[in-house]
Amino acid sequence: MRSRGFEVVEEYKDKGINLPVRKTKYSAGYDVEAAEDVVIPAYKFGTKPTLIPTGLKAYCGEDEYYMLVNRSSGPKKGFVMANSIGIIDSDYYNNESNEGHFYFQYFNFSDHDLEVKKGDVIGQVIFQKYLTVDDDKAEGMRSGGFGSTDK
């Protein structure tokens, strides 16, 4: 029985996407690569974050989620995740809007554009369990992809 893992989304099946791996036995995070070349422009007031596709989706238990986190070397290179960390719920997997494809969002605080090449490690995924309060009554169902719980 599968409990958690990664898959390539249909749109990227034939594009040589590598599944994330942990680099050491005691690493918490799975290193995720960019699915294509992307330029992250130097930040100016009003700049929107740049979305970097991974070509991946991830599955996990109903009482789990996964976090998208920056690499420790990211800020010293000038790029910082726009939302500090990304929290992705288990029901994002295979959603009807985008199949569960997750992206990293970055701002570039260096003084020049940053080029991310396909295959560059852009962040990490860490899987976690979560807890609920005694009187939790959540019954809603996901009806979309990225940002759909804001509606």
Image (cartoon, helix red, strand yellow):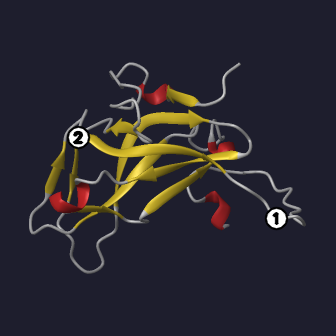
Q: Quadrant of the N terminus?
A: top right
Image position of 17 with respect to 81: above or below: above
Which callout, 1 or 2, points to the residue nearer the camera? 1
Label count reads: 2
Q: Nearer the viewer, residue 7 or 128?
A: 128
Disc 1 residue crowd, few under 14, some 14–19, many 20+, Cα 10 Å:
few
**Residue at figure coordinates x 66%, y 61% from the top left:** 149
Work out whether mark 1 precedes mark 2 in sequence or the reverse, and give the earlier one: 2
Query: Which quadrant of the structure image shows residue 5?
Result: top right
**Residue at figure coordinates x 34%, y 68% from the top left:** 48
Where residue 37 is drawn, which disc sits there?
Answer: 2
Disc 2 residue crowd, few under 14, some 14–19, many 20+, Cα 10 Å:
some
In-image side of 45 versus 76 (left or right): right
In-image side of 15 versus 113 (left or right): right
Q: Secondary structure at mark 2?
A: loop
CA distance separating discs 1 and 2: 43 Å
Q: Quadrant of the C terminus?
A: bottom right
Image position of 110 with respect to 129: above or below: below
Q: x, y (%) of residue 82?
A: 38, 65
* Amino acid beneath label 2: Asp
Q: Secondary structure at mark 1?
A: loop
Which residue position holds label 1?
A: 133
Image position of 24 with respect to 85: above or below: above
Q: x, y (%) of residue 3?
A: 66, 28
* Amino acid beneath label 1: Val
Tell which residue pokes out farthest to the front in this image: 26
